[in-house]
């Protein structure tokens, strides 16, 4: 056990600055993976790497024990045009560490890495610990955490590090994107047409606007359906044959994504095609010892509307991390230094309550 927590905090902040200064857009994370490897080398902790995913096992890993996964990601989105600060220049102002990926999810990642390092050589834990610093989370790409599940041992429970103000996200909405097509009869704009696809779309849009799903989740609330894109036509004098829509559905824990797809395909007044059904909702029981360990520290529970790598997991999982989700993907992204330091303390205390 690394007992010098202040040393871990200092080194975690140094690592976070290194990650910020190293561009790591999804599928281009090779150099941040190198930086994470350097951390484990500095503590003489053996590590493995699969593409841009770096993973480690606690020293006394025992296949007879259940396994806890610690996971967060080191890829980022691209900086938006509203940045006024250099997104790759980590610097501290008024207690805020600025830089792309500082909040989403660098703060959570380095805090989990420090926490793993603290417990690495601890004997007699009731769970094994596997940490995966994963790639391609922002794009749900094929070479991220989902690709690691066939490589690492079976996972019984997981902590996924994302900015939650260190509160306990005990459920997370899933996601299904649908491509919808509203049909009509193409024609010259000068001639009568009682089957104009654009006019037909008015009724379809009203249907989606008013549609509700019956099952309401105590933690995640209602399923949220939103029309987010519309496209039709190429010339001013031609009535198009169809209108294309994109439907974004955020799924609560009362439905599987397949159930949502079956319901909408049966009832919607237009043709629907789901792009993918793999990003299901996630949850962990409120009475799970991992959650109870956090509640005992005064942390609140809630349901998260945003998607994370939890969607790749089939086990119970808890989302928790330093930082604030509302800062993610924003211009001049930052995380408070104190949030990272407190995050390490809280992670360690939660795991002490769970692993002993």
Image (cartoon, grey):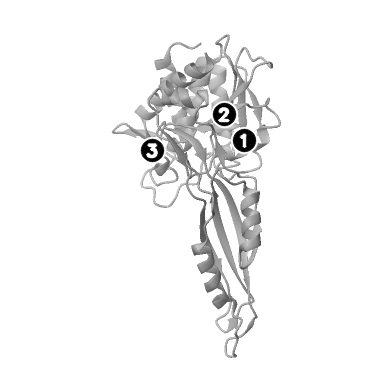
Q: Which mark is residue 203?
A: none
Q: Quadrant of residue 70?
A: top right
Q: Is residue 331 left or right of residue 134?
A: left
Task: Provide the residue designation for mark 3.
Answer: 334
Are the two marked residues, 2 and 3, in contact with CB atoms closer than 8 angstroms?
no
Q: Secondary structure at mark 2?
A: strand
Q: Quadrant of residue 313?
A: top right
Are the two marked residues, 2 and 1, in contact with CB atoms closer than 8 angstroms?
yes
Task: Provide the residue designation for mark 1.
Answer: 313
Instruction: Note whether 212 is above or below 65 in the view shown.
Output: below
* Residue 14 percent location from the top left of the image: 44, 25
Mark 1 crowd level (few <14, some 14–19, many ≥20, 10 Å Cα): many
Q: Secondary structure at mark 3?
A: strand
The structure residue drawn at horizontal position 65% and vertical position 28%, both measured from the top left corner, is 49
Earlier residue among tags 3 and 1: 1
Q: Secondary structure at mark 1?
A: loop
Q: Which mark is residue 158?
A: 2
Q: Residue furthest right?
A: 150
């Amino acid at each position: 056990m690394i007992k010098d927590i202040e040393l871990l905090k200092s080194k975690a902040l140094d690592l976070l600055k290194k990650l910020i200064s190293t561009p790591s857009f999804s599928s281009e994370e090779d150099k941040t993976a190198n930086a994470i490897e350097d951390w484990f080398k500095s503590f003489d902790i053996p590590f493995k790497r699969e593409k841009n995913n770096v993973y480690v096992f606690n020293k006394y890993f025992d296949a007879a024990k259940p396994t806890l996964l610690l996971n967060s990601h080191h890829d980022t989105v691209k900086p938006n045009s509203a940045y006024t600060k250099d997104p790759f220049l980590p610097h501290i102002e008024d207690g805020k560490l600025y830089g792309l990926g500082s909040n989403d999810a660098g703060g959570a990642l380095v805090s989990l890495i420090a926490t793993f390092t603290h417990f690495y050589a601890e004997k007699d834990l009731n769970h094994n610990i596997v940490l995966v610093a994963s790639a391609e989370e922002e794009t749900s790409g094929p070479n991220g955490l989902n690709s690691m599940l066939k490589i690492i041992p079976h996972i019984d429970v997981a902590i996924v590090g994302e900015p939650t103000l260190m509160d306990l996200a005990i459920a997370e909405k899933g996601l299904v994107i649908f491509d919808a097509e509203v049909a009509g009869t193409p024609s010259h704009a000068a001639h009568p047409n009682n089957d104009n696809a654009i006019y037909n779309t008015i009724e379809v849009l009203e249907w989606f606007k008013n549609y509700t799903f019956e099952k309401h989740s105590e933690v995640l609330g209602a399923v949220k359906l939103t029309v987010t894109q519309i496209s039709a036509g190429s010339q001013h004098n031609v009535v198009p044959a169809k209108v294309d829509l994109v439907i974004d559905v955020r799924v609560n824990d009362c439905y599987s994504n397949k159930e949502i797809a079956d319901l909408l395909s049966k009832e919607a007044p237009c043709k629907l095609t789901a792009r993918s059904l793999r990003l299901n909702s996630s949850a962990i029981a409120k009475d799970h010892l991992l959650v109870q360990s956090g509640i005992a520290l005064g942390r609140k529970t809630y349901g998260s509307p945003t998607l994370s790598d939890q969607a790749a997991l089939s086990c119970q999982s808890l989302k928790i991390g330093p930082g604030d989700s509302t800062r993610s993907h924003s211009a001049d992204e930052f995380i408070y230094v104190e949030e990272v330091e407190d995050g390490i303390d809280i992670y360690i205390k939660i795991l002490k309550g769970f692993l002993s």
